[in-house]
Every structure is written in C-alpha cells, then in structure tokens.
C-alpha cells in the first residue's frame, strides 16, 4: 500500500514562513533595544523608560487570546499581513507624536502585532508540517526569530552612527513590515503599480526637459492616455481567455522598454518625435494591464472573507504608486532624468520576472 500523502519539502516553507519571520524580527530587534533610550531622550526616568519598554510584553500578553480568534477567523496569511500593518501603525504613532504616552502606545500596539504574527506562523507550521519534522520546523522558527533579534541591534547601531538620531531606527521596522507584505507576488504588484505611475510623472517632466511647447506636450500625453483608456476591455478579455500572465508580463516589459528607450533620446535632434512615439507605446503597454492588480487580488483573496486581504493587497499597489514619484525625484536630483528612466525600466524588468515566477498558471474555466 502506497502512502498518498504529499511529500513535505523544507523549501516550501522558507518563503512563506521563515523569510517573513526573519524580516519582521530583524525590524523588531533593531527597534526594541532603542525604546528605553528614546524614552529617556523624551524626558522619562529610568523606571518609566523600563515601563514603556515592558509594554511590548504587555501587548503580547493582551494579544494572545484575540490572536487565536483572529487567525481562526481570517486565516494565517491574512493575519500575518494584518499584524505587519498594525506594527506599522504602532511605529507611526510612536514617531509622529514625540511624547511618552505615544511611545508607550506604539510599543503596546507592536506587542499586539507580535502576538498575532507569531501565532499565525505557529499555527501554519502546526497544520502544514508533518509530525515527524514538526519539532525541527518549530525550533527553526524560534531560531529565525532569534536571528532577527541578534542582527537587529547591529543594524540599529549602524543607522544611529550614520544619522545621529535614535528614532530613525524605528523606520527599520516600518521597512521590514512592508517587506513582509510585499513578499513574493506582492513585490511584483508593487513594482507594477510603481512603473504605471512613473509614466504619468516622467512624460510631463521629459517634455519640459526637452523644451517641448506645453500645448504640444499636453496633446501627446492626451493621445497616450486615450490609447490607455481604449484598451481596458481588451485587457480583461486577454486575462479571462489566456490567463493573467498575458496581460501582466507584456505590459510590464513594454513599459520597461519604453522608459529605457526614452532615456537615450533626450539629446537627439528628433527628440520630440521620439517622445511622441514612446508616449504612445507607453499608453499601449499600460492599457493592456488595465485591471490586473484588482484581478490578481480577487484571484488570491480567500472566498469566505476577502476584505482584509484585499485591503492589504490594495495598500501594496498604493505603496508602489506613492513611492514611484519620490524615487524619480530622488534619482533625477542625484543624477538626471535619463538615469531615472533607466531605473524605472530596470524595476519594470524585475517586476516582470517576479510576476512570471509567482502568478498562478491557470485560465478560469469557461461555463458550458
């Protein structure tokens, strides 16, 4: 009699369990040792600073039972994403209001997030890993937490030495939490959203940089937007008939190639003509990705309660979209607008590679 149970692979739990745990715990390991120092800088006595630091464990204790209910209700994956978002909120509370109550509240919220995050990973391994390897899997999980806490203080020390500010370290946890949300397919979605927004920023800047008259530039950008709009239904047809990859990958690669090509036309005598052609190309490439982020979110969301997952998934896209203009401005100020286009194109190629790897390979079954 053969064993029909699927074979367990350690590799199958590295990305969904161990990597997010390492990133989250590294952010915590950087921030938590700095909390008493920040508290004293804000005027706390040593006793009060110790109390504020202890709010992490108070938050964990308060969150243990609700975490079990939450994980059972929305699932391990959604709970992990929600915990990362709660940790971000806690850090922002501690940073935005430079008071001791805000610091204590932020650390307490981080404790709640830690309880949910830890239980979600624990519950997943308990149900997924075979009994014969359960102890090794869970001890490795504990080791990954410890690794993050071991490396975190060194990261904190380097950041304090570089910036001269203790509170700057708090942003490490924010970055780590976004890293947990953005794992796997979310990274590709964030990059897709970033390159789509980049087009709306780069084209006007480029027209100014090459000295194109404003009315001519507006006309070209309007034509590009019209082509983009005209393809929204065709994009849905492509995804429904051939699969999500056939919208995401050509669109991302098309936008990446367009941005990189534009970078080499700035000083050409025919730069206005090149700008017009590439603007039209970017509208075409962006048009065939219409609805892809919402569609992928709907594909991946749990059927029973999709709202928490979709909220986090939409935030991924919005994060990429919000970060793109800042990145373009930074690269343009440091180097040039040509360099910014090359960076955008490189990110588009990276996003296409990630989505090629992680988008599910299937076409929805047609009704007969």
Image (cartoon, rainbow, N blue to C red):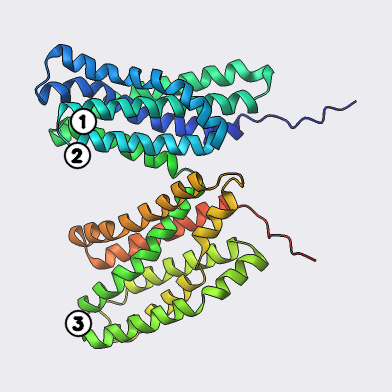
Q: Earlier in the sequence, mark 3 or mark 1?
A: 1
Secondary structure at numbered mark 1: helix
Query: Which numbered dot is residue 161?
Result: none
To which residue does mark 1 refer? 102
Task: Tell me if 60 is positioned left or right of 5 in this view.
Answer: left
Q: Given the current orientation, which residue lies at the most extreme top position?
A: 47
Nearer the observer: mark 2 or 3; the answer is 2
Q: Given the current orientation, which residue lies at the most extreme right position?
A: 1
Q: In front here: 213 or 58?
A: 58
Give the residue at x 87% y 27%.
2
Give the residue at x 69% y 60%.
364
Q: In front here: 181 or 301?
A: 301
Specify the quadrant of the image occupied by residue 228: bottom left
Q: In front here: 278 or 360?
A: 360
Give the residue at x 52% y 62%.
292
Q: Quadrant of the C terminus?
A: bottom right
To which residue does mark 2 refer? 96
Q: Position of residue 179 (x, y in %)?
A: 40, 41
């Amino acid at each position: 009699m053969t064993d029909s149970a699927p074979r367990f692979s350690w590799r199958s739990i590295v990305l969904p369990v161990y990597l997010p745990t390492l990133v989250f715990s590294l952010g915590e390991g950087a921030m938590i040792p700095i909390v008493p120092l920040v508290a004293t800088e804000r005027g706390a006595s040593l006793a009060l600073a110790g109390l504020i630091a202890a709010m992490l464990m108070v938050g964990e204790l308060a969150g243990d039972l609700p975490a079990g209910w939450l994980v059972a209700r929305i699932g391990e994956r959604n709970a992990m994403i929600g915990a990362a978002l709660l940790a971000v909120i806690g850090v922002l509370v501690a940073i935005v209001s430079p008071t001791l109550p805000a610091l204590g509240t932020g650390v307490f919220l981080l404790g709640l997030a830690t309880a949910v995050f830890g239980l979600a990973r624990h519950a997943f391994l308990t149900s997924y890993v075979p009994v014969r390897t359960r102890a090794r899997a869970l001890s490795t999980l504990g080791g990954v937490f410890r690794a993050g806490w071991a490396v975190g203080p060194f990261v904190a020390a380097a950041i304090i030495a570089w910036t001269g500010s203790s509170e700057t370290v708090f942003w490490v946890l924010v970055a780590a939490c976004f890293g947990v949300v953005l794992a796997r397919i979310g990274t590709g979605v964030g990059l897709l959203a970033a390159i789509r927004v980049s087009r709306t920023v780069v084209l006007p800047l480029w027209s100014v940089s090459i000295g194109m008259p404003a009315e001519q530039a507006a006309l070209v950008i309007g034509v590009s937007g019209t082509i983009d709009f005209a393809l929204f239904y065709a994009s849905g047809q492509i995804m429904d008939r051939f699969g999500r990859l056939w919208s995401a990958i050509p669109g991302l690669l098309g936008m990446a190639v367009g941005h990189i090509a534009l970078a080499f036309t700035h000083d050409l005598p025919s730069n206005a003509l090149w700008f017009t052609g590439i603007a039209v190309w970017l509208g075409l490439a962006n048009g065939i990705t219409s609805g892809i982020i919402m569609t992928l979110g709907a594909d991946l969301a749990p059927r029973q309660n999709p709202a928490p997952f979709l909220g986090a998934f939409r935030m991924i896209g919005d994060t990429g979209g919000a970060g793109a203009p800042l990145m373009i401005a930074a690269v343009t100020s440091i180097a040039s607008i040509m360099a910014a286009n090359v960076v955008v194109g490189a990110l588009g190629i990276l996003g296409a590679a990630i989505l090629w790897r992680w988008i599910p390979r299937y076409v929805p079954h047609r009704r007969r």
